[in-house]
Structure formats: structure tokens, C-alpha cells
Image (cartoon, grey):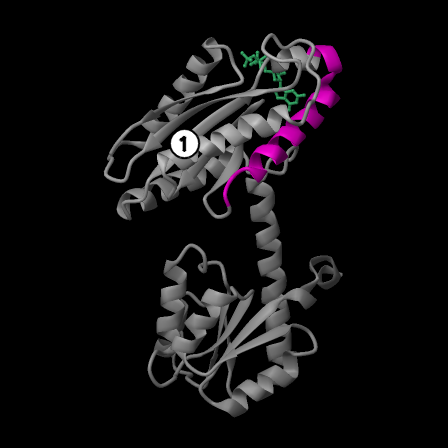
């Protein structure tokens, strides 16, 4: 039942072992159920993971060069990979070896020589758990109405992203925006039409964000926020201009608006240069204040400031 619900057939399983015969056996047992990727060393395993993040890794402990324990420890340190379950496939059996495996961050073991039935069922059980926790994480971080990130996702991810920018001398910007005269829109067209408008605006704004440079989140009500990273101040202004333009171009009628016949948005942007050093709260506060300035200046526009070099 759960197998069908989560469609485990699409799961990507990485099998890592220096012995070809072990890889062949695991491939034979699992290939009809999942997509199998293979690696013959720890180094090769890391290369495969970088190209195609697997849903689970079956990892030999003892290999020449980088051991399975080292591979597992490295993966668990990286946010992108820390949630990949690792099952050690091992002939080692004493208590200290087992403790080292748990400490490295594995979720389970399968002993060599491999019991076929145990391998198949352990993989199925851990894939099901992985898919369930992925689904829960997605739900917990997604805004139910618009499908973009929710406030929790921004609050959780932005400090990490901001720190990464400061550490790597990358520029970033926080942009706050909201829909103009949205109370009037609801009053005029009804709450359900308001919901549709929020969905449409969120989708349109999201489409203007350059790929891999940031994510949109609903900050609350009709307010949205995004943190864009690694873009010049000029490029960020281009993105904001295209957001304003694309929303107007939706041509959603808004009789109650005092600034346009259509739905519009207003934005505030705080740009943080590569050598800047200030708390994220200050940056968010600046972006929010600038949004109010842009509102005062007539709406359907943005105001921005540069907070560092
Ligand atoms: N339809 C709908 N309306 C919402 C939702 N969340 C918040 N709102 C409405 O958004 C409106 C926000 O109103 P205000 O904060 O006064 O802002 P505004 O009317 O856009 O005024 P300005 O921001 O000054 O242009 C309120 O009427 C809320 O009820 C939602 O999920 N769906």
C-alpha cells in the first residue's frame, strides 16, 4: 500500500562495494524494484552522489582508499546529503565496529554474506521511511495555498543561506513584497477570488527568480519574501522590475486599487554586498521599511538600499 503511495519504483539506490561480485548480487536483487547506481570506491561514490543524489546508499565499510565510514561521515556533514539513509553492508561483526558505524550516521546494517530476503526488506523499509519523512518535510515547509515556501521555511533556511553568503564573500539581497490594496480586492471580488489572486501572483513572482539564485516564501497574508544570492545589485534590480512588470501583465482587474486598473505589487529590497557584516534581522528590517517607503511613494514600484560594498 505505502509502496504504491510513495512510488518506490522511482527510488534511486546507490550500491557501493569494491568487490564486483557483491555489487552484482545487490544489483540482481534490487534492479527490478529501483533504479540502481553503482560505485567501486568511496571516492567514486561521492562523485555519483554529486551528479545524482540517491534516495538510499548501500555502503561497504571496508574499501581500499576512502572507507565507507569516511564516506558516511562526509555526507552527514552536508545539508544536501544528510538525509540520505546509509545502510552499511559489512562483514565486520564486533561491538566496536558496530558503534563506529552508528557514530558515522548510518540507519542500519546488512551483514555479509548477504541474506537476500533481509537486504530486500531493509531497503524497502528504509526507503518507505525516507519518502515519508521527505513528504512531511515538504508539507511542513510549504504554504498550503500558494505552494511556495511558508514562513517557517524562510525562518529556517534564510539564516543558513545568509551565513553561507558571508562566509563565501557572496552578495545577497532580501526582498519583501506585497499586493497593493489587497483588502479592497477581497472586499470587491470575494475571499476566494483573493485566494486565486494570491496563487497567481506567487506563481508569477516565482517564475522571475533566476534558477538556483533564491526561493520565494509567503511571509504572511499577502506578503512574500525572498533571499537572492550571488547576483549583482544591477541584476537584482532587473529581477524586481521583471516581477513588477509580470504581475501587471497578468491584467487581473482591481477596481479598488488607487494605483492601477490591475493587480500590482510593491517591493522593498536590501542588498548586502560581499564584504558586508551585519545581522540578518537588520537586513530583513531594512527591506520591510523600504517596502513601506515604496508604498508611500505610490505603490507598484520598489525602493532599495545597498548595505555593504
Ligand atoms: N483572500 C485572502 N486574503 C488574505 C489572505 N491572507 C490575508 N488576506 C487579506 O489581505 C488583506 C491585507 O490587507 P492590508 O494589510 O490592509 O493591506 P492592503 O489592503 O493590501 O493595503 P496596502 O498593503 O497598503 O496596499 C486583508 O484583507 C487580509 O484579509 C488569504 O490567505 N486569502
Q: Is residue 80 above or below residue 148?
A: below
Q: Quadrant of residue 171?
A: top left
Residue 190, given in percent of the width and then of the height, sits at: 74, 16
Q: Is residue 278 left or right of residue 304?
A: left
The magenta region covers 187-210
In this rendering, is residue 256 above or below 173?
A: above
Q: Is residue 100 visible?
A: no
Which residue is pictured at 42% across the width and 13% down the height? 293
Element carrying mark 1: strand
Residue at the image point whose x is 61% and y is 50% from the top: 135
- Label 1, residues with CA under 10 Å away: few <14, some 14-19, many ≥20: many
Magenta stretch prevailing secondary structure: helix
Is 196 inside the magenta-drawn segment?
Answer: yes
Where residue 92 appears, as percent x and y from the top left, is 41, 84
Give the quadrant of residue 9.
Answer: bottom right
Quadrant in which the C terminus is drawn: top left
Report the residue marked by disc 1. 174
Coordinates of residue 34 in the picture (x, y in percent): 65, 72
The x and y percentages for residue 66 are 34, 78
Amino acid at each position: 500500500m505505502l509502496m504504491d503511495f510513495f512510488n518506490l519504483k522511482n527510488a534511486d539506490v546507490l550500491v557501493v562495494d569494491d568487490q564486483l561480485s557483491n555489487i552484482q548480487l545487490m544489483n540482481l536483487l534490487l534492479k527490478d524494484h529501483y533504479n540502481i547506481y553503482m560505485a567501486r570506491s568511496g571516492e567514486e561514490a561521492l562523485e555519483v552522489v554529486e551528479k545524482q543524489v540517491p534516495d538510499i546508499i548501500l555502503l561497504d565499510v571496508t574499501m581500499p582508499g576512502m572507507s565507507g565510514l569516511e564516506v558516511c561521515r562526509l555526507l552527514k556533514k552536508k545539508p544536501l546529503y544528510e538525509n540520505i539513509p546509509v545502510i552499511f553492508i559489512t562483514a565486520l561483526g564486533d561491538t566496536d565496529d558496530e558503534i563506529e558505524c552508528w557514530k558515522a550516521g548510518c540507519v542500519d546494517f546488512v551483514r555479509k554474506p548477504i541474506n537476500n530476503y533481509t537486504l530486500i526488506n531493509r531497503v524497502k523499509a528504509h526507503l518507505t521511511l525516507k519518502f515519508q519523512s521527505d513528504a512531511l518535510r515538504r508539507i511542513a515547509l510549504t504554504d498550503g495555498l500558494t505552494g511556495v515556501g511558508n514562513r517557517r521555511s524562510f525562518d529556517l533556511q534564510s539564516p543558513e543561506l545568509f551565513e553561507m553568503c558571508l562566509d563565501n564573500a557572496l552578495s545577497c539581497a532580501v526582498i519583501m513584497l506585497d499586493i497593493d490594496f489587497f483588502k479592497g480586492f477581497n472586499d470587491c471580488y470575494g475571499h476566494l477570488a483573493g485566494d486565486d489572486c494570491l496563487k497567481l501572483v506567487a506563481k508569477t513572482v516565482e517564475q522571475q527568480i533566476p534558477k538556483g539564485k533564491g526561493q520565494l516564501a509567503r511571509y504572511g497574508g499577502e506578503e512574500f519574501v525572498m533571499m537572492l544570492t550571488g547576483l549583482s545589485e544591477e541584476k537584482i534590480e532587473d529581477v524586481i522590475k521583471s516581477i513588477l512588470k509580470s504581475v501587471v501583465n497578468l491584467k487581473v482587474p482591481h477596481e479598488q486599487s488607487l494605483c492601477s486598473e490591475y493587480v500590482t505589487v510593491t517591493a522593498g529590497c536590501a542588498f548586502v554586498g560581499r564584504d558586508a557584516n551585519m545581522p540578518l534581522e537588520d537586513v530583513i528590517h531594512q527591506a520591510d521599511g523600504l517596502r513601506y517607503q515604496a508604498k508611500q511613494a505610490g505603490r507598484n514600484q520598489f525602493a532599495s538600499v545597498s548595505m555593504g560594498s
